[in-house]
Amino acid sequence: MKRPIHIPIMKAFRLLMLIFAAILSTIDINAQRTPLLNSYPLAPATVYLDFDGQYVAGTIWNHNGPIDATPANLSVNDITEIFKRIAEDYHPFNINITTDSAVYNKAPVLQRIRIIFTSTSDWYNNSAGVSCVGSFTWGDDTPGWVFSNLLGNNPKFVAACASHEIGHTLGLQHQSLYTRGGRKITEYNGGSSMSESGWAPIMGVGYYKNCTIWQAGTSTAGCDSIQSDLEVIAGDRNHFGFRPDDYGDNHPKAGSINIFGQNFSIKGMINHAHDKDAFRINFKSENELRLSFVPNSIIQNETNIKISLLNANADTIARYEKPKLLYEGIDIMLDSGTYYFIIEEKGNDSSSNYVAPRFYAFSGLLIPAGDFKQLALQRAAQINPFLVIQAIDDNRKLPLDASCSEHMFRTSINLQENIIKQ
């Protein structure tokens, strides 16, 4: 007969406390996994970003039974970046983007949607995400999905996919491209420019471009079907419209610009004749700042935009109007410090001639001063009476046509000082 094992009371108590602490630690880790964030708590309409896993049953997705979706394999920093990117896309609207389930549960049943971020993707197919068009107002808690594992858990890609799927739930179709003859070229409009600093429609392919926008363009319904994303989202079907004023009018009330790596975007709405939108950006070191304007024809309005650039003392150091913004953009060297952009519409002194609201978007890029290389001038050829000279650095090539007189030359184009940094 085996002897009974006797554990001293204190030792047993300590063992139980250790086990209990381990359980609490696990619960605490899961509870703190997702930071509780809200973009616009005043709005009743709600989009819930669910990163914690979810058991889904009794919905359109459950043809083969319940789905036990695992939590997304994303860090707190990843989740915060994803939230900021999505909140920026939906900032013009009277809707709250939240990571708090309690906020979702209190939201009106006909004005809410859950987007599940998960690695459980094998039940569907190889799509990065899926949702039902118009499901925001169904009232049956049918969720949308983002399969973060199929996007490499890349915060930029995950956020772009989520904004796209949320757009579907709010009634949007894809932004597509067609030939002049009406043949569909691609289901998903990829936007402008091959570079990351370009723009792309949220309802097209927004993974690879810095600035994602709500476009007015041909939808997947056909070459003659023009979909204005802004009008659909803010329309009567969803019952929430635009915010009364999306950003403060002056530098003390400026909204902070989110910088991701070296990229950022500025997007907003001119809501009325006297509206101004103020943005704040901070640099810890000297940078070249480039800002490219998304043409009005893409957004389908006639905003006559004007930007003032202010320093930390709120002194105006530069002004830019639409022709320059459209054809040249902004390219300026800025020392470390705080700066403000004040955006307004030029020429609207009376509300009687104003049709509101008007959306605008800029794609921004920061290049640290330390990344500049000294430019070397290389004599390529001499064709009397002109000399072709090329300026080369590690990042780009700047061809310069120049007139020549012995060792002197003068460029035929004007280069701003901020292009050449020695």
Image (cartoon, helix red, strand yellow):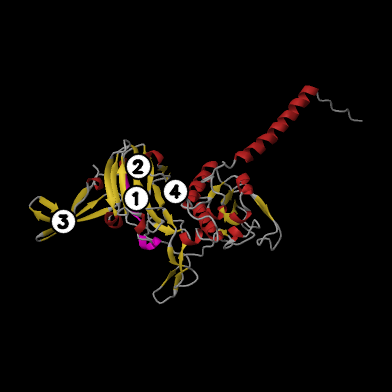
In which quadrant is the N terminus drawn? top right
Asked which quadrant contains residue 193, the reply is: bottom left
Classify 10 Å Cα crowding around label 4: few (below 14), some (14-19), many (20 and above). many
Q: In the image, 186: left or right of 310?
A: right
Q: Nearer the viewer, residue 230 or 373?
A: 230
Which mark lies nearer to you, 3 or 1? 1
Read off the magenta span.
Answer: 288-300
Callout 1, which amino acid? Glu
| Mark seen at residue 340 | 2
How much space separates mark 1 and mark 4, taking CA atoms? 13 Å
> Looking at numbered disc 4 in the image, what kind of residue is underneath it?
Asp
The label number, if any, that marks residue 412 in the structure image: 3
Rendered location of residue 142, percent (x, y): 64, 58
Q: Nearer the viewer, mark 2 or mark 4?
A: 4
Q: Are marks 3 and 2 in contact (CB under 8 Å)?
A: no
Q: Is residue 290 magenta?
A: yes
Kind of element beneath mark 2: strand
For marks 3 and 1 on the same chain, the one whose residue lies earlier in the sequence: 1
